[in-house]
Image (cartoon, rainbow, N blue to C red):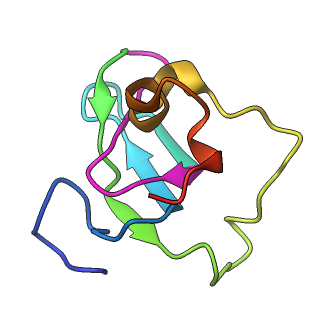
Amino acid sequence: MWSEGKGKTPYQGKGRCFGEYRCPKCNRGWMSGNSWANMGQECQTCRINVYPHKQRPLQKPDGLDASDLSKEHPRHLCEKCKRLGRYCRNTYY
């Protein structure tokens, strides 16, 4: 479910999606294929939780969100991983 303004993130569905983040404190930007509704990721520099400003389905890649499976997901920065107590990618909701 994609709806602007309802919740902490643009995406309000149950599954994983692709998110774009920008830290309001240091302006550092990053992208993640492990983005979830109403969940943020910590900025590696400032260590503050940042919610994605843009999210889109993983099923519609535009080149930028091609998964690099060799790249480790920073679980210690992911709100979803912290809440689950395990790697979030193996979760569907």
Residue 14 is one of the magenta-drawn residues? no
Q: Single out the residue that lies furthest toward the left.
A: 6
In this view, the residue in front, 56 or 75, is: 75
Q: Residue 41: percent from the left, percent from the top?
A: 41, 34
Q: Residue 18: percent from the left, percent from the top?
A: 53, 62
Position of 84 relative to 19 (above/below): above
Q: Residue 40: percent from the left, percent from the top?
A: 34, 40
Q: Quadrant of the C terminus?
A: bottom left
In this view, the residue in front, 53 or 56, is: 56
Residue at the image position 67 percent from the left and 65 percent from the top: 65
Residue at the image position 49 percent from the left and 23 percent from the top: 85
Residue 42 is one of the magenta-drawn residues? yes
Position of 40 compared to 73: left or right? left
Q: How many numbered marks are there?
A: 0
Position of 29 relative to 59 (above/below): above
Q: Which residues are magenta?
A: 32-46
Residue at the image position 42 percent from the left and 37 percent from the top: 80
In this view, the residue in front, 83 or 54, is: 83
Q: Residue 28: percent from the left, percent from the top?
A: 44, 34
